[in-house]
Amino acid sequence: MKNLIIFLTVVFCSTAFSAVAKKNETPVKDFDNVVATTVEALKLPGDSRMEFLAKLGPKAYKELMTVAFDSNYGMKVQWRALTAMAMLGKANAIPEVERALQHKDWYLRNAGLVVMNEVKPSKAREWAKKLIADPSLIVRTEAVGVLRKNRDLSARKLLWERLYDKQNFRGTQSLWVRRHIVETLGEMKTKGDEMKFLKVLDDKDKSLHPAALSALEALTQKHFGEPHDSVNQKAKLWRKFFANNKNKTRI
């Protein structure tokens, strides 16, 4: 539950990046403490936040970098500082975003993925393939999300490997990232994946089954059971179908 609360907090914070910054106006001068002013601006709602930061001029960008990597400000403020910095700097912010992607704090690595996907998706895909094995479950989940959003077909083999990697289990308990992986693979499915998705139907984690069923239906253009049948009932019918057709060259 604690991890879920943190994850939802991060997702909520990430929506700040979707705000559209207004065009720069004449920079405000004579602020006694730009750092303090920048931090105050980060407390504002998305549109107002970016409008105010734009008014502060170039100094704001530099101070946002300072705030983003200063743990004394806390996760929420650091997250907003990093996203605001990237919105102001665009491609110029990439070196600092990559610094965040290598940071010791998971929430900065997570923020880095979100931000990089907006600034330069191709680099985000590269980083996602690295961070899909991150120690943080939340970061791993975000990495899968980046690959899914970009429909990175080159990551299919890696995703199948990560689905069964012991890192994505706590003891024998399947972790939520596995559902995200199966859903992503379902969207990237290709002929030849049928037996892989059938194997997913045997997984103890039943949350994986709906996406596997959908993938099988799409790949084979077949549907078993009635609309009111449970996932378990449909899974049994699929197992029976494959058992009866295992010696056939084509399904």
Image: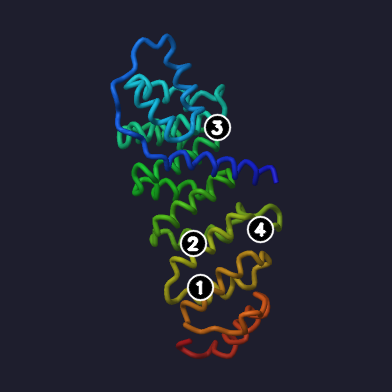
Q: Earlier in the sequence, mark 3 or mark 4?
A: 3
Q: Amino acid at mark 4?
A: Ser
Q: Are marks 3 and 2 in contact (CB under 8 Å)?
A: no
Residue type marked 1: Ala
- Specify the amino acid type for callout 3: Lys
Q: CA distance from mark 3 to mark 4?
A: 29 Å
Amino acid at pointer 2:
Thr
SS category of the residue bearing label 3: helix
Mark 1 vs 2, N-terminal side = 2
For residue 43, above or below residue 117: above
Q: Which residue is mark 2?
A: 184
Looking at the picture, how far across and down is residue 61, in whole percent? Answer: 37, 25
On residue 174, the disc is 4
Q: Real-space Cα distance between discs 1 and 4?
A: 20 Å
Which residue lies at the image location 49% right of the left edge and 22% below the top edge?
Answer: 40
Name the image quarter holding residue 19.
top left
User: Who is closer to the viewer here, 26 or 96?
Assistant: 26
Name the residue beneath numbered marker 3.
76
Answer with mark 3 or mark 2, whichever residue precedes in sequence: 3
Of residues 142 and 19, which is closer to you in this image?
A: 19
Q: Earlier in the sequence, mark 1 or mark 4?
A: 4
Q: Nearer the viewer, mark 1 or mark 4?
A: 1
Q: Judge from the rendering whether residue 30 lies leftward or rightward of residue 6; answer left or right.
A: left
Q: Which residue is mark 1?
A: 215
Q: Disc 2, disc 4: CB below 8 Å? A: no
Is 225 in front, or is 71? Answer: 225
